[in-house]
Image (cartoon, grey):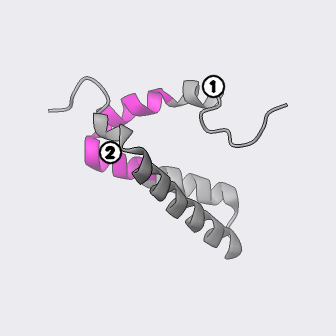
Amino acid sequence: MIPDTVPAAFDSDAESKRLALGLVTEAFAEGCLDGIDGDCMAQAALFAAFQELVATYGEDATARYAETLPERIRGGGFTTTLQH
């Protein structure tokens, strides 16, 4: 049974997230050094991430999680540089 809300596991501990982000950032850097375009890397990473979330939590829970992304993006939740 798929829960009505996004699973709490989507909010894993901060240290695990920090370590995982470091690994993904390193993979991006290696891909760019190998001549792979950053946009290509980003799309592949998103596909792999959503594939894993669907396998772990199911399509409905993952879709509910994805529905929160536009607000988080517009709110600067993924911005790492200063905005003018």
Residue 56 horizontal side relative to residue 32, left or right: left
Query: Label for residue 75?
Result: 1
Q: Mark 2 points at which residue?
A: 54
Q: Which residue lies furthest to the left in this view?
A: 1
User: In front here: 80 or 44?
Assistant: 80
Give residue 23's position: percent from left, percent from top: 51, 63
Q: Look at label 2 and name its amino acid.
A: Val
Q: What range of the chain is rendered magenta?
A: 49-68
Q: Look at label 1 and name its amino acid.
A: Gly
Tell me if mark 1 has few (under 14), some (14-19) or many (20+) residues whose alpha carbon lies within 10 angstroms of its own: few
> Does the magenta-highlighted stretch encompass residue 18?
no
Residue drawn 75% across the image and 42% down it? 81
Query: Label for residue 45?
Result: none
Q: Is residue 36 above or below residue 14?
A: below
Q: Earlier in the sequence, mark 2 or mark 1?
A: 2
Element at label 2 = helix
Q: Distance between the residues labelled 2 and 1?
A: 25 Å
Residue 15 horizontal side relative to residue 37, left or right: left
Q: Main secondary structure of the magenta part?
A: helix
Element at label 1 = loop
Q: Is residue 15 above or below residue 11?
A: below
Residue 75 horizontal side relative to residue 51, left or right: right
Give residue 79's position: percent from left, percent from top: 67, 38
Which is more foreground, mark 2 or mark 1? 1
Residue drawn 67% across the image and 54% down it? 39
Labels 2 and 1 touching (C-beta < 8 A): no
The quarter of the displayed image where residue 28 is located: bottom right
